[in-house]
Amino acid sequence: MQIPVITNRLSIGALSINDHDFVFELLNSKGWLEFIGNRNIHSKEDAVNYISKILVTPNLTYWVVRLTDGNIPVGIISFIKRDYLLHYDLGFAFLPQYMGLGYAYEAAAEVKLKIMQDPAHAQLLATTFPHNSSSIRLLKKLGFQYEKQIEVKNEILQVYSVTNRPSHG
């Protein structure tokens, strides 16, 4: 699913091999390692291989969020159909120096809006660790509601859900 999106401050477009330096930095950031997990990206080559796998994996999409001023990559929004979830999972990760500035909300809200216009994606899920309070706050701000707690690979995850209910009126 391709979603080129432009907001007042951001452009959101498809991940490409050319994003390897950014991916290397993001996947080795404290937040990624703590809340998403170590992907063992230790070199440019590792980052290129990681991106290559994403680009050929069905039901897995990463969009790069860039500042329109300078075209600087600051984060990603992911859209993943996970085996253990009934619906697609919307995710986000941002470089630490760009957190707390509203970029994650701005990007995720726009992508969520575009995705949910497709009736096939009238419900979206999101997962996070119970101790990831900043992600939980953002999910709630985006309209997601806590649904349940699950265990995946010996880790406890909280599942959040948002539904695009048709309005009657």
Image (cartoon, rainbow, N blue to C red):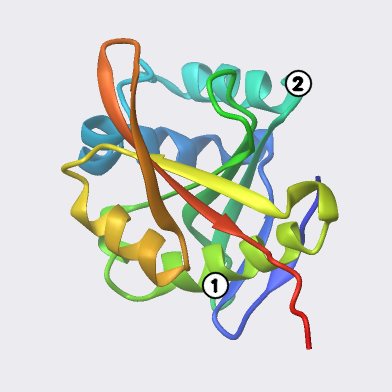
Q: Residue at x 26, y 25 (%)?
A: 156
Q: Quadrant of residue 164?
A: bottom right
Quadrant where the N terminus is found in the figure: top right
Q: What's the mark number on residue 156?
A: none
User: Depth check: 55 or 163 in front?
Assistant: 163
Element at label 1: loop
Q: Hey, which residue is sitting farthest top in the picture?
A: 153
Q: Residue furthest front?
A: 169
Mark 2 / mark 1, whichever is N-terminal: 2
In this rendered view, identify the residue nearer to me: 162 or 29: 162
Q: Which mark is residue 56?
A: 2
Q: Residue at x 20, y 54 (%)?
A: 133
Q: Within 10 angstroms of label 2, few (less than 14), some, or many (20 or more) residues?
A: few
Please name the residue shown 76% across and 62% down the image: 4
Cα separation between marks 2 and 1: 29 Å
Callout 1 amino acid: Gly
Query: Residue 47 location in percent, x, y?
Result: 50, 25
Task: Indicate the amino acid at tag 2.
Answer: Val
Closest to the observer, 104 or 89: 89
Specify the farthest residue to the left. 131
According to the image, label 1 marks what residue? 70
Where is residue 127 drawn, in percent x and y? 41, 39
Q: How many marks?
A: 2
x and y, in percent, of residue 57 in the image: 72, 20
| Residue at position x 67%, y 22% in the image | 52
Q: Quadrant of residue 139?
A: bottom left
